[in-house]
Amino acid sequence: MKDEKSGRNWEQKRYEDTLTQVYTSQDEQETIFKAVRLRDYQDKEEVRLCIAKDDRLVKALQTPLSKLGERINEIINYGVVVSYVDRASLIKEVYRLYQGIPVIDKVEGLGWQYSADGEVKAFAGSEFIGIDGKDKVADIEAGLPIKKGTDNMETINSYMNKNVVREIVMLYNLTAPVAGMLKQCFILSLHGKSSTGKTTLAKLAASQTCSPEYDRLCKTLNTTDNASEKGLEGIKGLGVLLDDTSLTNKGFDWDRFLYRLSTGRTKERLNRDCQVMEARRFYSTIVLTTEMSILSKVDPNREGNNGRIIEIPVKEGIAFDDDVECRGMELYYRKNYGNALPTLVKKIIGLGCAEVKDMVYSEELDLRKAYAEQDVVVKRHFLEIAALRVTARMANQYLGYQFHIEDITAFLIENIAVSLIDTREMQPADRVYTVLYPELVNVAGVSKEIDGKVYRYIEGKVFKNLVDTHCKGISCKEAKNILWERNLLLKIGNTFSIVKNVGNGEELRGYWLICEGEK
């Protein structure tokens, strides 16, 4: 059965039906003006004037009432010719009717809406939910996500119960409202080769909140860190997907990026007066997909990164059994999205936001008692795991999910502990050989056989960029010596570099890699 109370068209009509007519111009165009008042959670108001155009209402002006007179001329920007007499009459009518003009809440970012004193007032997602747990008229100009179709829990449970990784990824997205209330950012990275289904799994999880095409929450991380972070500002409780982090620029500073993501801060930016601009914080769950481990790209001496991110390798057969299952679930989330999260949020509001937070803190204490022997870095994830456990319990009880809470907990703690050991045990030589060398060979030039050995030429600046990207804390000189000791880099006399004359008096410096497996 089709849900008539979903989709952009229904939200548009609901919003437009709220507006009230305040004036009709006296010229032959007979332009109709409608108005609505927008009130934020500091009780500040603005009036929005809309004009009827092409069978829909278009926003022509939004301003505090006190500035209506000085800004009224802006309505001509929308192709409407309004005489001075009509403008004066319009102002007069808005003032006269102002107290009777309907009021809707102003949306201030995605997710939880707070008053000046930090009190929860609403939740803005695929439904705009009031503190009474009921959905309200949403400001269509806020561009909130929409919902479509209906969740089939038999399909979801049958799919995700095949392994714990699927359950974890699905649960991460649902945990975003709890993370928002706790003012925390929880980061999960799925890494594995291309075509293992990790992106499709992440999008299926995101569909619990919104359409996987909704670009305010589902992004491809192929821009600068500055641009990527700016899009996160103001999100408080809706899960974010940052897909294909392998497309980031060379030299991308993952250490600082992870720190800012985990603390809900964006990169500082300057305004025209060279003053630091104040940015809105964000609190949520963030799922990253990448081909290579992110922890392999950061400084191994900074093991605090292990306390900021949980990484799960996704091999073939983990995300999906086969291509048929993958395409089937992809078709499912394209037809059904944005349904689970608002239902969960209503339950959280019904239980009480403060009470749910207390449940998480109590759960965290129990974890610290049960896993007292774990490393302090592992324990940094206990609040995160506690939030997942509380969310899973609510989802099981109220939404019909079948999360295996103890299996999820055991898997995550073991996975974090093993990842930490790997970080501590990986010496510079191991890092150069296992992480850097494959990347060097991948971008090097065509192969050339000399005396039975296969060589590939790589430019010096490319070599340096890859060392800086994949071997934080290791110098180019150290990397070259390690490769030479393993017979993977040609050394002529006392030097590694080969100088090529490229014409016009310019020289190009580079190196000859010895290609393992091609000898």
Image (spheres, grey):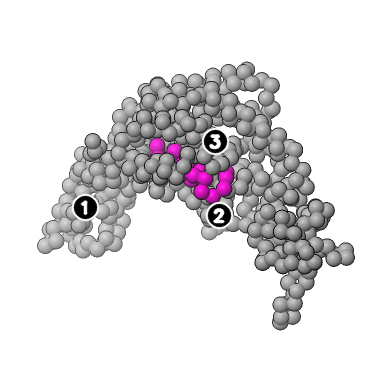
Residue ranking furthest to the front: 452
| Mark with earlier residue (3, 2) | 3
- Ranked by sequence position, the earlier of labels 1 and 2 is 1
Q: In the picture shown, does residue 196 fall above or below 160? A: below
Residue where numbered disc 1 is placed? 56
Q: Residue at x 66, y 20 (%)?
A: 372
Question: Residue 247: which numbered mark, if any?
Answer: 2
Relative horizontal placement of residue 382, taking residue 457 as reference (left or right): left
Judged from the image, the secondary structure of the residue bearing numbered disc 2 is helix
Q: Quadrant of residue 208?
A: top left
Q: Quadrant of the C terminus?
A: bottom right
Instruction: Name the kind of residue labelled 3 in the image.
Output: Phe
Judged left or right of residue 110, residue 1 is left
The range drawn in magenta is 185-210
Amino acid tagged 2: Leu
Indicate yes or no whether the magenta region holds residue 104: no
Circles 3 and 1: CB atoms closer than 8 Å: no
Which is nearer the N-term, disc 3 or disc 1?
1
Residue at mark 3 to residue at mark 1: CA–CA distance = 41 Å
| Viewer-closest of 331 and 426 | 331
Residue drawn at 75 percent across, 46 percent down = 430
Question: Residue 61, image x and y in percent?
Answer: 29, 53
Q: Could one spot residue 78 in this view of the protein?
A: yes
Q: Nearer the viewer, mark 3 or mark 2?
A: 2
User: Residue at the spot x=80%, y=52% of the render?
Assistant: 486
Task: Label 3: state its secondary structure.
Answer: strand
Q: Residue at x 15, y 53 (%)?
A: 24
Q: Nearer the viewer, residue 394 or 489?
A: 489
Q: Residues within 10 Å of mark 1 (few under 14, many from 20)?
A: few
